[in-house]
Image (tube, rainbow, N blue to C red):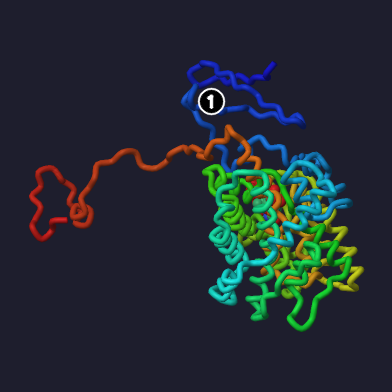
Amino acid sequence: MTEKATLTMPDGSTYEVPVTVGSEGERALNISRLRADTGYITLDDGYGNTGSCESAITFIDGEQGILRYRGYPVEDIAKHCSFIETAQLLIWGELPSAEDRTRFSDLLTENSTLPEDFRRHFAGFPQHAHPMSILSAMINALQSYDLPGLVINDDEEFERVSAALLSKVRTIAAAAYKSSIGEPIMYPRYDLRYVENFLHMMFSKPYRDYVPSAEATSALNLFLLLHADHEQNCSTSTVRMVASGEASLYASVSAGVCALWGKLHGGANQAVMEMLTYIRESGMSTKDYIAKVKSREDGIKLMGFGHRVYRNFDPRAVILQDACEKLLDSLHITDPRLDIARELAQTALSDDYFISRKLYPNVDFFSGIILTALGIPVEMFTVLFAIGRMPGWIANWKEMHDDPTGRIYRPRQVYTGPTEREWVNRFQRERGMTDSRGFKVPDDLRP
Ligand code: SDX
């Protein structure tokens, strides 16, 4: 029996709203027929209370600090999976078999290079171009080299395009970095696994290969899989919005890259590192900085803190803090910004300003310290987030693409602009003449 809620409208009439119940017991008032039946729409600034879709990919319980990919707790995924296995789980719904792994690994290798004439596009960007602008543009440009991938009609084509995006996003990112430092773009190698190959393309030179340590590879693998999906966040919702118009997978994830760039979203990892560096270089105490945040001076926020959904610890932040400590120990690196981050967290987590607002460290708070320890420059941090999030964007695009009942996203609005008004000709507007009835327009003023 379908649960129902009853709305009492201002005219006293009642309207029954069916309730949709999710597999974890989440409940939603299904208002799909509200306007047709009552003439009313709902209004929800920032969509904080609005479900845009039913999805079977990722589950978050913000109150409990729970994150699961296709039902598996992220803690288990972090312990047992590679980033690519995580990607296959998210996209196809099950952990890959040995055959799936081999086939997909071969596809990643075969699709890891960029078309030779494509590589010249990097020279078209100024050296100071932000790599997120390059990444979005290049992903969009890629579809000009993969016309069959524009309209995906079968599973095999989808798997190939998915592998191409996952593999090339890494090659484009590294190429953007190399171009920004004026070094030759490195080709991917067929004998390296996903993360090692990325680090090779980032840091090898034509005359000397970069061989990452096992700890570095493991830390980056963890970073990427922890960013792999996160329900209907800003960038994933953007991917779904673009996909709903039946745009290609390339166009949809390219839009996702742009949405991710904002400093309130994926750009926060760069903003956190800039904040920690500012505190260190200014010599300001963490207490003074927290005081500035609380006073809302210049609207500054404690970057890397807070979350629309998590009203408890972000489980990814807990895992990343531990990984951060271990990585720096293994690399014998001390980064004073980690001490500052720890102090900020300790101070904030015992301060009622943050406690009362349920503000905890999120995925971005410690991630930048890991990336810095790996030698990744701060401008590339959000690009690394995009590489990590690619599986989630692809999985959400597929979920929409496979849904025969899917509709184009087209939210409504409550109009608050001027009501209808009479047209006033230009000469009346500019000369302040208001009577347009029967007024003889002087010849030199005819519009
Ligand atoms: C990501 O959605 C996702 O799942 C995103 C993500 C993913 O994996 O895709 O998890 C990745 O984007 C993580 C978030 C990264 N962004 C930041 O770290 C930027 C700093 N955080 C804030 O800007 C903020 O917390 C947001 C954007 C993350 C959430 O904003 P909300 O839900 O709109 O919360 P809000 O702005 O309404 O804040 C509620 C209160 C306000 O105070 P009052 O007006 O009630 O007095 O909390 C305050 C805010 O001023 N507040 C903060 C704060 N975050 C919120 N105060 C200081 N520092 C902060 N970081």
Residue for badge 1: 33
Q: Tag 1: Cα neighbours inside 10 Å, few (<14), some, or many (≥20)?
A: few
Residue at image position (72%, 37%) is: 56
Q: Quadrant of the C terminus?
A: bottom left
Residue 438 pos. (x, y %): 9, 44
- Compared across the picture, whether 287 is left or right of 156 comes to right
- Seen as rendered, the residue at the extreme bottom is 207
Of residues 43 and 354, which is closer to you in this image?
A: 43
Residue at image position (60%, 50%) is: 249
Residue 335 drawn above or below residue 412: below
Residue 43 drawn above or below residue 39: below
Residue 343 pos. (x, y %): 83, 62
Dividing the picture into quarters, in which one does residue 141 lie? Answer: bottom right
The reply to whether residue 382 is visible in this rendering is: no
Dividing the picture into quarters, in which one does residue 346 lie? Answer: bottom right
The reply to whether residue 440 is visible in this rendering is: yes
Dividing the picture into quarters, in which one does residue 240 lie? Answer: top right
- Compared across the picture, whether 194 is left or right of 424 comes to right
Of residues 92 and 419, which is closer to you in this image?
A: 92
Task: Specify the amino acid type for callout 1.
Answer: Arg
- Compared across the picture, whether 137 is left or right of 189 comes to left
Residue 258 pos. (x, y %): 58, 57
Residue at image position (88%, 66%) is: 215
Residue 69 pos. (x, y %): 78, 44
